[in-house]
Amino acid sequence: MDAFVLHVDEALIVADKPAGLLAVPGRGPDKQDCLSARIQQSYPDTLIVHRLDMATSGLICFARTAEAQRRLNRSFEERMVGKRYCARVSGRLEGKGEIDLPLAVDWENRPKSKVDPVHGKPSRTHWRAAGYDAASDSTRVELAPVTGRSHQLRVHMAAIGHPIVGDPLYAPLAPVEPAPRMCLHAMALSLFHPADGHPVEFFSPPPF
């Protein structure tokens, strides 16, 4: 089994993407090395379903048949897939809440996105604080996106004054102690199996 693959069957592959590796191919010959391409070396029928940012680690699923890909795509479109992330954010954050801020691509500063009350698409994120660390002045949080906009978790946390530690786009430019990576990890993924419709859930412990 491929080093990144956690689960494989006739219809579904679930992998644990490391931070710093593209999920799918990008534009240009220097952006062809990616998780999907590496998995395709072992499973040539691997089909892309969704993506994670290059700097984000954690769970991502792929299909192995066109029908499985169609069913999984529909599940994502209809918000039937449960996704939970772990992050470490700057500053002290307590309790839990919801961020409901519309997002749009920041065309003048691509690939960034931004909060845009006029042209932005509805975007919603649930968050729950899971512990403050005074030494680093950061809080561990669990994040559950309801929608799936580009950079949603990163923009939402920055918008409420708690950017994700190590975020190269939305965190302060000169942190006192630069993080070795962006502290955002897709730790839990729950979905209906594309072959039989049974609910399945996968978990990857946060590496930070």
Image: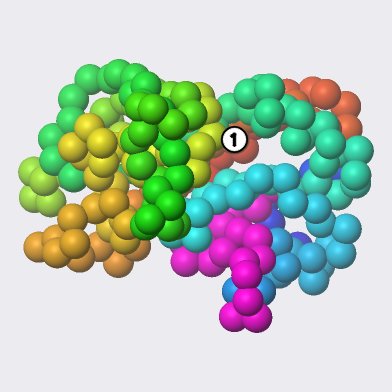
Q: Quadrant of the N terminus?
A: bottom right
Indicate the quadrant where residue 32 lies: bottom right
Mark 1 lies on residue: 189
Question: In the image, 167: left or right of 204?
Answer: left
Whether 206 is drawn above or below 81: the answer is below
Boundaries of the magenta span: 13-30
Does the magenta-highlighted stretch encompass residue 179? no
In percent of width and height, residue 16 lies at: 59, 54
State whether residue 131 appears in this view.
Answer: no
Task: Tell me which colouring the rendered structure shows.
Answer: rainbow
Q: Amino acid at mark 1?
A: Leu
Question: Residue at 61% across / 49% down in the picture?
Answer: 51
Question: Residue at 62% across / 67% down in the picture?
Answer: 26
Tell me which secondary structure the magenta stretch mostly adopts: loop
Question: In the image, 148: left or right of 63?
Answer: left
Whether 75 is drawn above or below 18: the answer is above
Indicate the quadrant where residue 154 lies: top left
Does the magenta-highlighted stretch encompass residue 25? yes
In percent of width and height, residue 166 lies at: 28, 58
Question: Residue at 18% across / 30% down in the picture?
Answer: 93
Label 1: state its secondary structure. Answer: strand
Question: In the image, 97: left or right of 3?
Answer: left
State whether residue 96 appears in this view.
Answer: yes
In percent of width and height, residue 81 lies at: 64, 28
